[in-house]
Image (cartoon, coloured by chain):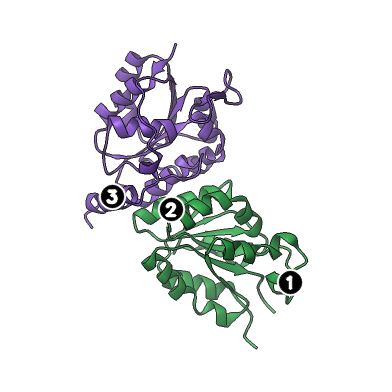
Amino acid sequence: MTDPLSGEQILAGLAQAEIEFVVALPDIVTCDELLWPIERSQSFRLVNVCKEDEGISICAGMSYAERRALLLIQHTGFLDSINAIRVMGMDYQLPIVMMVGLQGIEKDCTPAVSEQNGVRIIEPILTAMNIRYQILHGSADASGIAEAIDEAYTSSHPLVFLIPGFGG
Amino acid sequence: MTMKRDQALKVLSQHYPDGIVVPVYQSAFDWMGIRPHPLNYLCTGAMGQGSSHALGLALACPAEPVVVLDGDGSLLMNLGSLVTIAEQKPQNLWHFVCQNGIYEVNGEFPIPGQKTVDFAAMALAAGYNEAHTFSDLSEFSRLLPRILATPGPVLVALHVEAGEPFPRDYEAIHSPQSRAAFKAALAGRRGR
């Protein structure tokens, strides 16, 4: 069994992938392990947004200048931003990289069988939109973050990391 | 009193001939005709998102001036972006809003608050560095150079009505060629 996921691992992956900007709206799943450390970090510039679809467009604008960004949001914000993601990700194939906290998912549960409607529909929506995604269950999953981000920017396509939670 | 939009945009093009511009909807169609240029960022895609694309560009390219030509209906969809922009304080961002009171490319139906909404007041309340409202072309022409010399973020609400009709070339604003041209022009501008 893999070790538990930690924020430190993810932050190391983001740094290795040369992420410069983190565009974010707070999410209870990722706030303590990611957002607060990012806010204190000198390695990233934090852009707080009022609504998640702003972040899709901010990351899109940055991508034209070949500056790398991560959008850190909750799955509810992902759902709220579908049209912007559809355009920037599907139609324009821009490298919009998202980390999405799955607020409300049950412990040791995969999103596909969650009793939370909003969580359970995320994977089918990503599949329907032909957006690549990874679920970060544990430490082993986090080890591939940098490579996946690098590939997304090199090949210019959107990418989503789903985060069920941290710790054991 | 209002200005003809094409006349106001022609004035802007005279004072801002070759920088990055993020125009949306009817302003984009007009702007393409008035100032065709590879640094026109046409592919904002989803309505309301122009100001956020512009912020991304402004933060990513702090040495480049960025102008967004927003619409009133568009900005109403993304009012939070005023606060987001104000907090980031991009000194290289000038936010123009073509305020005609209607959803011009969507049946010309009135926007909410058509007779009352005050974008300049909202921008100042959000924390923009400056904000102005113009409905007279000569006054706009006279003050524009000073506005463009003022560090952003600055919002300029332009009370306009349709002027010379320009074709609504949706294919161009969504085209891969437009996106590639912008990216190449930006790379060239930044010396890459």
- Which quadrant of the rendered structure holds the N terminus of chain A? bottom right
Mark 1 vs 2, N-terminal side? 2
Q: Is A42 rendered above or below residue B7?
A: below
Chain A: give its colour. Answer: green
Q: Secondary structure at mark 3?
A: helix
Residue picked out by circle 2: A60
Spatial separation of the CA atoms under disc 3 and disc 2: 15 Å
Circle number at residue B181: 3
The one nearer the camera, B96 or A28, is B96
Residue in the picture at 30% in, 31% down:
B33
Give the amino acid at mark 3: Ala
Q: Chain of mark 2?
A: A
Give the amino acid at mark 2: Ala
Q: Residues within 10 Å of mark 3 (few under 14, many from 20)?
A: some
Residue picked out by circle 1: A113
Q: Secondary structure at mark 1?
A: helix
Q: Secondary structure at mark 2?
A: helix
Residue in the picture at 50% in, 29% down:
B72
